[in-house]
Amino acid sequence: MLIEQKLDSRPSNLRRLSYAYGSAHHIHLYGPPGPVMQHGGRTYDVWCLNDYLGLMNLPSAREAEGRTALELGASYPHAARITFGNSPEHEAMDRTLAAFTGKEEAMLLTLGYMGMVSVIDTLLDRHDILVYDQGIHACGIDGVRLHRGERFSFRHNDVAHLEAMLKAASEKLDPKRGSILVLVDGVYSMLGEQAPLARIVALKSRYKFSLLVDDSHGFGVLGRNGRGTAEAQGCEEGVDTLFSSFTKALGSLGGFVAARHSVIQHLRYNLRSHIFSRSMPLAVLRGLAERFRVMRTEPQRRETLWHNAQQLQQGLAAAGLDIGTPGGAPTPVHLQGDEIAAIRLVEMLREEFRLFAYAVAYPVIQKGKVLVRLVPTAAHTRQQIDRCIAAMSALPAMMPACFGGIAAAPSMPQRPDKGSEGRGAGQSRSLPATDNAEMSSAGIQRMCRPQGHARPGPTRSA
Ligand SMILES: Cc1ncc(COP(=O)(O)O)c(C=O)c1O
């Protein structure tokens, strides 16, 4: 069988869904990024951008990006940092990040995903043992895949299971040649839960390991100063290596890694995504530096974010919707139906309520689970929040198959930046139940015909 035949006969889950329900994937959203954007010539409320602090559209940052692009081109400098792609501004950003995070040294990464994969790959050799949470982001998983030594996974946020895995890893380790690295996310991007970082750090008194945290969804938003999940939980010292993307709270591109001098020096000369790929464009860096400045000097943006997140989460919980235990901004609404039901639900949100949200299914989350992910930001208005709560509250009556009957309202979530360990924080028209047979039958071949992977957006009411 040729690879092309194999790929057509065994489509991945997302491709299968995308071909069958193309209006749910590869959406075109137009206009300045923010809580209101355009799609197919109509205006929508946007609940699907990780623009936590509302910085994507910061005029001074966009101005810096545009000015630099006009002066030097959008992609200058044209080389890897280790060769001819360095600049005083890249170096200054490294220093700013080290000072802000309180780590000895930091380094910019051109792309978050690639950077994280490469950091894991570069820190470890075959003698090292990797112990990781089963819920980590795909970039962590891909880093795990590259690891040539032993690995142990533990159940999501289950500290007792982590301890059992640490015990097993310690027994297997040759301490003269290797070490143990524990890898977790600070805030889990889809479930919105914080990692129990303080309890994980406490395990250091019994087991010898280093801790690497991907805090892409905590950095900039959690903790008094926005230093992230570890700051919020009072255990920053215990995080040995801190990684974050800049595509969430900073509304920009790239990311960074911060750690001890020896670690960052090793990464500077060995990180494959750094030495074999170009440096962050100066236009992007100047916009990032401006957003970073505003993130630090305008803490009220964090206040507004948490106020908005709390309003949204309380409203959804009061409506009896299952939002799990969000400890960050990402707000899941767990569904009972299957992934097709979830796709129909977000289509319903879009068509009936003019609201964009994500439908999330495998492989983004565990097989068999489906949810709608809502992202409150500092830029959302009270009216938008009320509209979103009203829309979500109307859905169980409109799509009962997705909800399996509404449960009694659970207790209100707490403000997530205050607590520790992730626990801080109408109209009705029945639709037919989802048609699973359509997905599981020979329809797959038909769906995978190369008819263009992204069918155009909705036509019904556009
Ligand atoms: C937890 C986490 N880590 C890393 C990344 C990768 O970030 P980037 O978009 O900068 O490549 C993401 C992005 O979705 C993420 O959610």
Image (cartoon, helix red, strand yellow):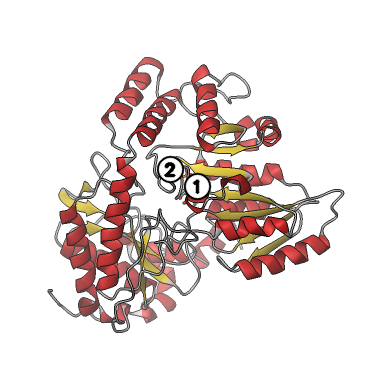
Q: Where is residue 257 drawn, in percent x and y?
A: 57, 38
Q: Quadrant of residue 458?
A: bottom left
Dot 1 crowding, Cα within 10 Å, few <14, some 14–19, many 20+: many
The three-letter amino acid code for the residue at tag 1 is Glu
Q: Could you tell me how far apart the alpha carbons at marks 2 and 1 are, in whole angstroms?
A: 8 Å
Residue at 84 percent of width and 52 percent of height: 175
Residue marked by disc 2 = 226
Residue ranking furthest to the bottom: 405
Q: Quadrant of residue 290?
A: top left
Residue marked by disc 1 = 231
Q: Nearer the viewer, residue 229 or 21?
A: 229
Q: Nearer the viewer, residue 78 or 388?
A: 388
Q: Where is residue 127 drawn, in percent x and y?
A: 81, 51
Q: Is 382 left or right of 221, judged from the image as shown?
A: left
Q: Are marks 2 and 1 in contact (CB under 8 Å)?
A: yes
Q: Quadrant of residue 84?
A: top right
Q: Is residue 233 above or below residue 430?
A: above
